[in-house]
Amino acid sequence: MSSNFPLNKDQLDNLIKKFPTPFYLYDEEAIRQNMRKFTKAFSIFPKFREHYAVKACPNPYILKILADEGCGADCSSLPELMLSEMAGIKEDHVIFTSNETPAEEYKYAYERKNIINLDDITHIEFLKKHLGKLPETICFRYNPGNEKTGCNSIIGKPEEAKYGLTRPQIIEAYKICKAEGVKHFGLHTMVASNELNPDFFIDTAKLVFELASEIKEKTGVRIEFVDLGGGLGIPYKPDQVAVDYDQIAQGIRKEYDRVIVPAGLDPLAIYWECGRPITGPYGWLITTAIHEKHIYREYIAVDSCMADLMRPGMYGSYHEVTVSGKENAPKTQVYDVVGSLCENCDKFAVQRQLPKIDLGDHVIIHDAGAHGRAMGFNYNGKLRCGEVLMRPDGSFMQIRRRETIDDLFATLDLANVKNFN
Ligand SMILES: *Cc1c(COP(=O)(O)O)cnc(C)c1O
């Protein structure tokens, strides 16, 4: 578990009187403190910016907090670009790292002067065709193929991933764009997800720095920023350790001094587009135990399900589970903690050692502040839960309401269904 839940039993009980479970709770102060640590670590570079991956927690209140801490946004769709705009994020602090992008979305990003990160060499022509010209700034996403090994299972091997350009393509792409009059260039790569080993990111930076230097040599294009993507992990399991931002920053700085400075590319801006480590540990899914079941296994059912948090069901991911008021109680039981979806993978915890849970207990699912509510869905007619923000002064604010049945049926043409036969 990477961060302690901020409320004791009385405080949570009071909150639940106002906001019935299930809901997500986010801790603003903890998000801010973590962001400051991240920024401080990377202040050893002449230019640095984190572009928060909007998909991890697409709520404009969260984006506004992060923007206040100096973040930009990383978007992969038009609604995400719109959310960044709603949060007041400066246009050129928004990176559009999309793939298989429809023309209207490129157009929207171009008109708002967001930075466009192209996922393929054919998209140069695609942009010209649909925008009439190329933007002043272009970034390309590099796929290192079998140059990069040791990648973990969520993203898989780079040579099997659909993203980015190959090495020969990317050299060619910069040549073309230079000839077309593009003025500013960036280089992006993202090859990890939920990776906890700092050396992995230092090694990725080395690869990208060497490529930036090769691009300068072969094409005369000066890369002005490298975007190292996301993928920094968080310690979901109690025995895992959080990545040390300073260690990563200092390791990357060494490669910067070794490769970037002699290549004449200093100052080079370092960008990240992390989601998980920025909000993941500071969000919780708060539920109530509503059923217990004693069959071949012991089950505790809560008033939420994988429609609110699909990571355990989808990836078999571990999320720490605690019971409000029983944080220090002996873990005498082994439970499957389950939701109400008609899918047997709908289990927040499997065969987990926990204190005895009574009906009405508040069961807290940890590390849900990134890729949590965002990945929700409506299968089985499930209504996704709302989101509550704990402000630095300890007050609470609803930043998204719970879905209603009307929301669920809004896309159906109900007026005509009666007469349909
Ligand atoms: C998902 C994603 C991110 C964020 O990943 P995290 O694991 O949340 O840090 C960043 N960039 C791109 C292109 C992504 O697809």
Image (cartoon, grey):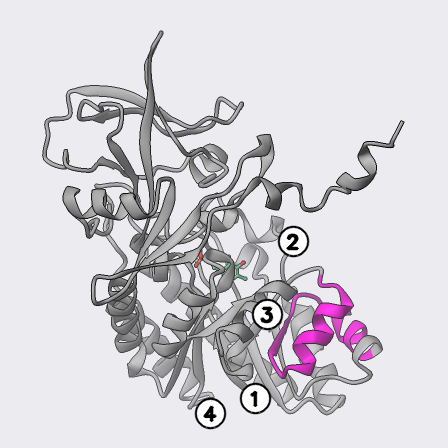
227 or 345: nearer the viewer? 345
Looking at the image, the residue that sits furthest to the right is 421
Q: Amino acid at mark 4?
A: Gly
Task: Please name the residue shown 39% across and 81% down the image.
Answer: 48
Please tell me whether residue 372 is drawn above or below residue 54 in the rendered image: above
Number of the front mark, 4 or 1: 1
Q: Amino acid at mark 1?
A: Arg
Contact, mark 2 vs mark 3 (Cβ under 8 Å): no
Res 121 seen here: no
Task: Please name the residue shown 37% across and 66% down the image.
Answer: 202
Give me the C-alpha separation between circle 3 and circle 1.
27 Å
Q: Amino acid at mark 2?
A: Lys
Does the segment drawn in magenta span residue 115?
A: yes
Number of the front mark, 4 or 3: 3
Mark 1: which secondary structure?
loop
The residue indicated by pointer 2 is 162
The residue indicated by pointer 1 is 222
Residue 138: give its label.
Answer: none
Give me the C-alpha separation between circle 2 and circle 1.
27 Å
| Image quarter of the N terminus | top left
Give me the C-alpha separation between circle 2 and circle 3.
22 Å
The residue indicated by pointer 4 is 264
Which circle's residue, 3 or 1, is located before the other in the chain?
Answer: 3
Which circle's residue, 4 or 3, is located before the other in the chain?
Answer: 3
The local crowd at label 4, few if under 14, some if 14 to 19, many if 20 or more residues have their Cα within 10 Å, is few
311 or 24: nearer the viewer? 24
Q: Which residues are magenta?
A: 101-128
Q: Amino acid at mark 3?
A: Leu
Mark 4: which secondary structure?
loop
Residue 334 lies, in percent from the top left, at 24, 20
